[in-house]
Amino acid sequence: MDGSGAYNPRTVEEVFRDFKGRRAGMIKALTADVQEFYRQCDPEKENLCLYGHPNEHWEVNLPAEEVPPELPEPVLGINFARDGMQEKDWLSLVSVHSDAWLLAVAFFFAARFGFDKADRKRLFNMINDLPTIFEVVTGTAKKQTKEKSSVSNNSSNKSKSNSKLQRLSESRGKYSKPTPKDEEEDEGVEDEEDEEQGETLCGACGENYASDEFWICCDICENWFHGKCVKITPARAEHIKQYKCPSCSNKRARS
């Protein structure tokens, strides 16, 4: 389905890279490209599957005809459930099956190329360090990060941390270096703030915050996104009064 015959990852690092690429493509389909994904999953069509490819692209297509298939197949008929439930529930269902498929593909490679117990454990730990597609799509990963932060910070630290995050929000996700005065005010809580920002996850790809990347926050759902994931540049962000992520824009259009 995706040229896997010419692409066979043989090491733990290669299988993990394959996993991340497929995962990024599927997250993109369920978040940034959700409107197009919804359109392609027409219930009037035959059994359809959502495929993630190693190059971070996604595809809605019929399953391969050969039996057994070259790789494990995703769940069939995701399009049939589209109009039978609320959109968020349908996307959650597709997310769960997508997570299961990604694990199946990763450990298919692990078995095919004879990974031993140590390699299989290392592969699983690398995969488990990333939030699942379900967690990214439903916002569970963000909630877990917030809960962890609220437990570790006291009320005074929260107010100072919020002031720095507010500056981050006002700059549309582009982190501005604090002044010397700011650094004095934030002394003692900077490490905790950096940890909090480092735990912030992109609502599109699910990757962590990095200070050298441009980020933007949705004013509706308050999720953060890499600018590149939602196709927003710093120059364009300067002219946006209220930013709505693709998911929130899509919901508003349907309502």
Image (cartoon, rainbow, N blue to C red):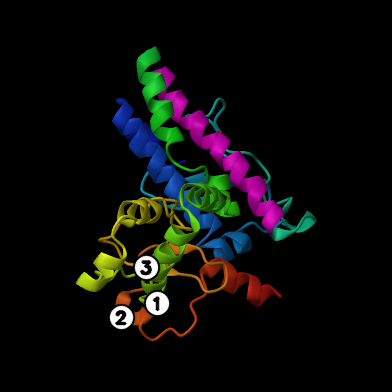
At which x and y percent is residue 168?
37, 70
Secondary structure, magenta segment, majority class:
helix
Report the front residue among 39 and 122.
Answer: 122
Q: Is residue 169 magenta?
A: no
Please say if 247 is above or below 243.
above
Left or right for 91, reference 217: right
- Which quarter of the picture shows residue 220? bottom right
Query: Residue 156: in sight, yes or no?
Result: yes
Left or right for 47, reference 183: right
Residue labelled with disc 1: 170
At which x and y percent is residue 27?
49, 52
Q: Residue at x 36, y 31 (%)?
A: 15
Amino acid bearing label 1: Glu
Residue labelled with disc 3: 164
Viewer-nearest of discs 1 and 2: 1
What SS does tag 3 mark? helix
Residue labelled with disc 2: 235
Which residue occupies the extreme left position in the image?
A: 180
Instruction: Quote the CA–CA distance across marks 3 and 1.
Output: 10 Å
Viewer-nearest of discs 3 and 2: 3
| Mark positioned earlier in the residue sequence (3 or 2) | 3
Please say if 231 is above or below 123.
below
- Which quarter of the picture shows residue 63? top right
Amino acid bearing label 2: Ala
